């Protein structure tokens, strides 16, 4: 705008704890920490700024008993989830208001090799003390996964070549290859009841990824969402590239 531009890179590591406190019930606590690099360009000059701090805490309760069916080598689950985002973050990383989320989570596994999972969430935003609301948000994910693992079978009397030995070593604990679709609709933010023009919009991404088991209890997750729809309202920074990297430990 006005002959200048701004480029923003965000890093948001988060610690998430999932605890099952009874059959069919679990509580999820997520605490993100945001790091933002911004580069302001005006003419031939560039100015960089980096800020960081805790973001708002989110607490969810998930109930997996809406529908549950087990089959040999597979299962079907339909769960309900309810969450609250509380304004515990630093000034520049907090909405300053409570937000409520409700949704459904569906999982279908066939012979433990093919898995479909999908979730749908709607978040209701409230106003902070300055009369500002970030706008309601609707989000959905749909993912297809295939489990791959080394069989370890070598014909009698045969000697495995180095490609086979490398493959057996690489996938000795298994991995899920994932293709996911992520969609988000964000309503315009509102200031004292009036819509803020350059806010809100719709995004849609296709996300190839992998969940790789380093051991029976420890896995690494990686995903690279590719934006295919970036229909944002007004003038806003558009998402160009994103990556998700995580580690999960099963107690």
Image (cartoon, rainbow, N blue to C red):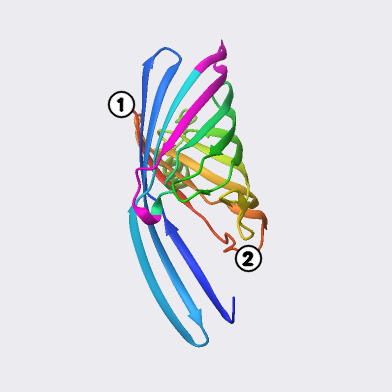
Q: Position of residue 166 (x, y in %)?
A: 42, 44
Q: Position of residue 152 (x, y in %)?
A: 44, 31
Q: Position of residue 229 (x, y in %)?
A: 68, 54
| Local crowd size for mark 2, using a 10 Å CA cut-off: few (<14), some (14–19), many (≥20) | few
Residue 251 image label: 1
Of mark 1 and mark 2, the one earlier in the sequence is 2
Q: Is residue 165 above or below residue 78?
A: below
Residue 26 vs residue 41: left or right? left
**Residue 199 in view here:** yes
Residue at 59%, 63% in the rendered image? 236
Q: Quadrant of residue 172?
A: top left
- Does 27 lie within the magenta span? no
Which quarter shows the N terminus? bottom right
Q: Is residue 74 above or below residue 130?
A: above
Q: Quadrant of residue 235?
A: bottom right
Residue 235 image label: 2
**Mark 1–mark 2 distance (CA, rounded to whole Å):** 46 Å
| Local crowd size for mark 1, using a 10 Å CA cut-off: few (<14), some (14–19), many (≥20) | few
Q: Position of residue 211 (x, y in %)?
A: 46, 39
Residue 34 vs residue 150: left or right? left
Residue at 53%, 45% in the rendered image? 209
Q: Closer to the camera, 39 or 20?
A: 39
- Segment tinted magenta in the rendering: 64-92
Q: In what element is the residue under mark 1?
A: loop
């Amino acid at each position: 705008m006005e002959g200048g531009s701004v480029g923003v890179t965000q890093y948001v590591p988060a610690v998430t704890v999932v605890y099952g406190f009874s059959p069919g019930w679990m509580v999820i606590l997520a605490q993100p920490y945001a790091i933002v690099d911004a580069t302001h360009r005006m003419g031939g000059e560039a100015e960089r700024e980096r800020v960081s701090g805790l973001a708002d805490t989110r607490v969810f309760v998930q109930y997996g008993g809406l529908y549950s069916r087990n089959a040999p080598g597979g299962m079907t689950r339909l769960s309900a989830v309810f969450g609250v985002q509380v304004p515990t973050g630093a000034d520049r990383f907090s909405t300053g208001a409570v937000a409520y989320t409700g949704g459904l989570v569906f999982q279908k596994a066939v012979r433990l090799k093919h898995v479909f999972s999908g979730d749908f969430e709607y978040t209701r935003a409230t106003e902070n003390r300055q009369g500002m609301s970030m706008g309601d948000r609707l989000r959905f994910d749909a993912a297809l996964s295939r489990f791959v693992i080394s069989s370890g079978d070598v014909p009698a009397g045969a000697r495995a070549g180095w490609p086979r030995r490398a493959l057996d070593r690489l996938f000795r604990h298994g991995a899920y290859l994932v293709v996911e679709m992520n969609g988000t609709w964000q309503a315009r933010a509102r200031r004292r009841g009036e819509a803020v023009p350059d806010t809100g919009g719709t995004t849609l991404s296709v996300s190839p990824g992998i969940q790789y088991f380093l051991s029976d209890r420890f896995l690494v997750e990686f995903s690279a969402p590719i934006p295919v729809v970036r229909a944002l309202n007004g003038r806003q920074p558009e998402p160009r590239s994103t990556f998700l990297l995580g580690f999960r430990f099963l107690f």
